[in-house]
Amino acid sequence: MNQDIATASAKEKNIPASTDIVVKVRNLKKSFGDTHVLRDINLDLHNSENLVILGRSGTGKSVLIKCMVGLITPDAGSITILNYDVLSLNQKEMNELRLHVGFSFQGSALYDSMTVRENLEFPLKRNLGINDPHELEERVVKALEDVGLEDAINKMPAELSGGMKKRIGIARTLILNPKIMLYDEPTAGLDPITSIEINELILKVRDKYKTSSIIITHDISSARHTSDRVIALVGGYSKYEGTFDEIRQTTDPELEPFFNY
């Protein structure tokens, strides 16, 4: 996507100027043996923006956000999040950054042996040192209300549907009040109606918590519904950038099938 078009589009959608960049990735590269997953990735995430990273399975979308939170170490490039130079952080500094960055895993990552209540209490106790029963109850109930599942507070993960697990996973992330949300394939494995509900929740989270979000997906409906801006990954490169309507005009054979629905 032409950079001038992308810049003009950002102004039309009231996306903040570059001074409000909260995530900056430059020339990021990552290989696994002879497999080059990320060849040259560049992106900016602006304050209060929903940025969708669109691409086919296996194009390195999940690897990209795992690099952002220190779960994978890239081979080259730079990552700056909330003025933290991610690749230079020690473990203590990385843990501090992670308090500000919520990661919604594709599989929800709930602890099967814990109730919903206990799953949400866990990060409050471990990361914030909160043990007061009344404060724990208040925070857990509020997080569940925000995702519409307050009645599930005493259920076990095995009792929840796939969509409910996604919501609880998001609630557990939101309970720490992150400034940035990273969503890894938020609608994967869900039926169309539940997918719409998750897309609506992503928008609600952005509006209520004032988060900036990166949404990793190959679900074109999710990309259309949730994005302020889209970056398309092709062959390990951040090749196209613009609004959803601008990206859909591409004739790149790697991307055309996404829009033929």
Image (tube, rainbow, N blue to C red):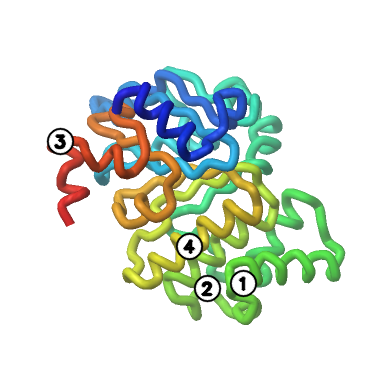
Dot 2 corresponds to which residue?
157
Q: Earlier in the sequence, mark 4 or mark 3?
A: 4
**Which of the numbered marks, if any, corresponds to residue 200?**
4
Residue 147: x and y in percent read 58, 67
Dot 3 corresponds to which residue?
251
Q: Quick check: marks 4 and 2 in contact, CB under 8 Å?
A: no
Point 56% across, 27% down: residue: 17
Crowd class of label 1 (few under 14; some 14 to 19; many from 20; radius 10 Å): many
Q: Amino acid at mark 3?
A: Thr
Query: Is 88 positioned to the left or the right of 127 in the image?
Result: left
Point 20% across, 36% down: residue: 250
* Mark 4 to mark 2 CA distance (whole Å): 22 Å
Q: Earlier in the sequence, mark 1 or mark 4?
A: 1
Q: Quick check: marks 1 and 2 in contact, CB under 8 Å?
A: yes
Q: Nearer the viewer, mark 3 or mark 2?
A: 3
Residue 223 in sight from this viewpoint: yes
Point 48% across, 53% down: residue: 105
Q: Secondary structure at mark 2?
A: helix
Q: Nearer the viewer, residue 208 or 219?
A: 208
Q: Secondary structure at mark 3?
A: loop
Q: Amino acid at mark 2?
A: Pro
Q: Earlier in the sequence, mark 1 or mark 2?
A: 1
Q: Nearer the viewer, residue 260 or 136?
A: 260
Q: Amino acid at mark 4?
A: Glu
Q: Secondary structure at mark 1?
A: helix
Dot 1 corresponds to which residue?
116
Q: Amino acid at mark 1?
A: Val
Residue 32 in sight from this viewpoint: no
